[in-house]
């Protein structure tokens, strides 16, 4: 459970910084040039930051540097996933974090094995859909696509479908 709390704290702090563009603000703007909202966000973050132990600060800085080095596409995908995560119900968040912790504890070989298995399942599903669609009319294909979208939205939860 401690790992989950650390992960949630990291996400909160990380996205407070990344959303604000903290690195950009710190290097290019002076305090007096910031808007009132930006100042409040930085103060709020700074108060949390001061309370963190040095090890956690080091970890967060390392993760921020790693994030800062990512392509804009990857950053966008991470922000999008974070937004989805924030909109999940507490039960779904807990379930997801529990699965994350379980996956984190696996050996590298087991992780690779699971990824291969997942890719294989996805490929099989795609192939199955293609074969099924090849015998469908345009109207049937459209109806099937709409149904898949509905199912996907239901799986993602009510919060994510409101976006």
Image (spheres, rainbow, N blue to C red):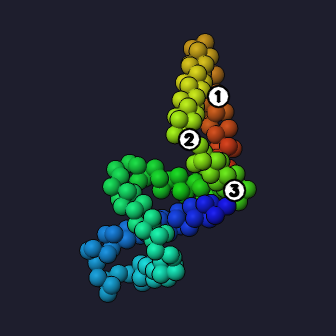
Indicate which label's residue lies in the foreground, 2 or 1.
2
Crowdedness near tag 3: few (<14), some (14–19) or many (≥20) residues, C-alpha within 10 Å: some
Mark 1 sits on what residue?
143
Mark 2 sits on what residue?
107
| Picture quarter with the N terminus | bottom right
Question: Where's residue 95, x and y in %?
Answer: 70, 51
| Picture quarter with the C terminus | bottom right
Q: Residue furthest top?
A: 135
Rendered residue at 37%/68% (across/down)? 21
Horizontal side of residue 27 vs 96, given as left or right? left
Q: Residue furthest bottom?
A: 32
Indicate which label's residue lies in the foreground, 3 or 1.
3
Nearer the observer, 139 or 21: 21
Helix, strand or loop at disc 1? helix
Q: Earlier in the sequence, mark 3 or mark 1?
A: 3
Rendered residue at 69%/44% (across/down)? 154
Crowdedness near tag 1: few (<14), some (14–19) or many (≥20) residues, C-alpha within 10 Å: few
Quadrant in which residue 3 is drawn: bottom right
Q: Are marks 3 and 2 in contact (CB under 8 Å)?
A: no
Indicate which label's residue lies in the foreground, 3 or 2.
2
Q: Which mark is residue 94?
A: 3
Helix, strand or loop at disc 2? loop
Please determine whether, in this image, residue 38 is positioned above or below residue 136: below
Quadrant in which residue 150 is drawn: top right
């Amino acid at each position: 459970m401690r790992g989950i709390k650390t992960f949630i704290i990291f996400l909160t702090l990380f996205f407070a910084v990344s959303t604000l563009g903290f690195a950009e603000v710190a290097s290019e703007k002076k305090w007096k040039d910031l808007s009132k909202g930006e100042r409040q966000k930085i103060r709020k973050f700074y108060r949390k930051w001061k309370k963190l132990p040095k090890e956690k600060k080091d970890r967060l800085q390392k993760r921020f540097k790693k994030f800062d080095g990512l392509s804009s596409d990857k950053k966008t995908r991470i922000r999008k996933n974070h937004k989805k995560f924030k909109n999940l119900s507490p039960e779904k968040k807990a379930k997801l974090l529990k699965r994350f912790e379980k996956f984190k504890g696996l050996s590298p070989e087991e992780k690779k094995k699971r990824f291969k298995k997942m890719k294989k399942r996805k490929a099989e599903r795609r192939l199955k859909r293609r074969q099924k669609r090849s015998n469908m009319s345009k109207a049937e294909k459209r109806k099937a696509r709409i149904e898949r979208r509905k199912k996907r939205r239901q799986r993602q939860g009510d919060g994510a479908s409101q976006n």
